Image (cartoon, helix red, strand yellow):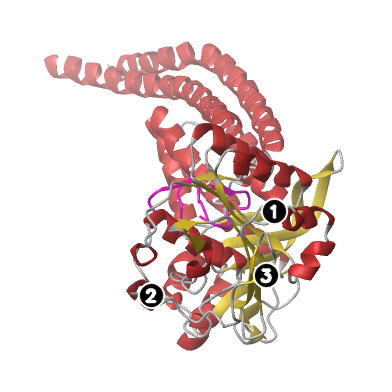
Amino acid sequence: MKLRLVGGLILVFATGNLGFAVARRLRERVALLIRLQGLLQFLITEIDFAVTLFPEALIKVGESLGSDVNMFCNQVVKSLDLGLPLSAAWEHGLTSLVNDSPLQPGDIRPLLTLAPIIGLTDSKDQLRHLKLAQEHLRQRQLEAEQEADKNQKLWCYLGVLSGLVTVLILI
Amino acid sequence: MSHRSQAQILEEEIIPYLTHSVQEPLRCLPLDLKDRLLEIRLRVGRPVMLVHNDGDMVLSEGNTLSKSEMEQTVQFVTRSSIYACEEELRQGFITLPGGHRVGIVGKAVLDEGRIRTIKHISGLNIRLARQVVGAANPVLPYLVESNSFVSTLIVSPPGCGKTTLLRDLIRQLSTGIPRLKLRGYKIGVVDERSEIAACFRGIQQNDVGPRTDVLDGARKAEGIMLLLRSMSPEIIATDEVGSPADILALEEALVSGVRLIATAHGDGIDDLKQRPVLRELVERGLFSRIVILGMSQGAGTIEAIYNGQELKSVFVRTPIIRGEDDETKTCRRPNTGLRYG
């Protein structure tokens, strides 16, 4: 009996954890979308006020944001150092970012549209495009928030309850 | 300053900014050609041209530069930050680390009649910077009166070495010249086109001496007044004067007791006298010496030196070969001693 109880608890714990993990990814997606907007805001400041060169701006910005954004920035700078054009380096960095993150492919579309432009036009044009991309990211963030609100609890309950149901069936 | 061969400079300071299709043929050039290289000219849809001491040549027969290669080169040259080079684009050139200048042409975008920026860049001219240490040695003795340097105007057509001579004059006067009993002067340089000190993001790439303050990128007239107010220079140096505002500022500096070194485009003293603005400089004797450079015996030939007040020649013509002191041994162009100004 004791063994069954322990087994049941492990099962509920495992499925519950799975549900919580899915719910956490929903929250992380929102947080990352906010950090990416922060990245663009920092870039706007560096381009508009400090007139920092783009690779240096990326390094500075990466250091002040989360590790995932920092990794993205470092990846772009590394590709530039290898002699890649900025558009290719930017796209390459975004692909790596999506692969290891809770982001959905559509989330980085606003950033991908920046690839052929970023760093390569005058400051007025840069600001216009960066602000537009920021706005698109904000829209994605609102959608992600709605999805998280709707599904976060659902996944948590689903995890725990599916464990309990399985235990009951097995008993 | 460390002295490297022209080939090393090319490899370290120029080649990284070019696309692979240009890098490889450049690396394969013979060493003596690399040493004589003056300019690399890139044009969309045309072959890459090299300009050297004896003329020009195509880098790689049959290979033309594509639009995307040009765009990539512009990205490399601007470090993917065109927005940070707007002022340079307005002026038509970008300075690279090492003082090399990249001239830019394309479609000019105008704003109230003035160039705001250049887009659709179609041509780049990479001019390799070479400082000729000792280039001023032959003229210096003529520019000293009573153990003191006198105001000097250097005149020549483009490409005869005005700026090179000016740069070395600044360096030597700033350091001090014991053989002429000249102490080191405090010099203020208005480097409107970043050609004299070749500043890259505020750091001088050329040696202009220990007592030299460089105001980089400022308009000459404004810059001279700023230096007068703020840096108490004993000598003010600037390149290519020519506008009425420049002349007014130069006069203001002279009245303040500051000596001047300036350059101007011209083809001799008679040519100067026919130019409305420069004529005033000559007729009013603002400069004590006028040095005329030419090409009669190679780039950098001193054609004449005049006493600025009486317009009498004080010099017998000779080509500038090399400096006489030990430093001159580091010159990278032993043939003429001077490169384009």
Q: Residue at x 67, y 59 (%)?
A: B309
In front here: A75 or B320? B320
The local secondary structure at tag 1 comes to: loop
Image coords of residue B318 (percent x, y)? 57, 83
In front here: B339 or A105? B339
Q: Is residue B225 left or right of residue B268?
A: left
Q: CA distance from mark 1 to mark 2?
A: 30 Å
Q: Quadrant of residue A165?
A: top left
Q: Is residue B112 left or right of residue B307?
A: right
- Residue type indicated by callout 3: Lys
Residue bearing the label numbered 3: B312
Q: Which residues are magenta?
A: B189-213
Dot 2: few (<14), some (14–19), or many (≥20) neighbours within 10 Å?
some
Do pointers 3 and 1 mark residues of a single chain? yes
The local secondary structure at tag 2 comes to: helix
Residue bearing the label numbered 1: B241
Point out which mark residue A96 bears: none
Look at the image and say whether residue A114 sits in the magenta stretch: no
Residue bearing the label numbered 2: B330
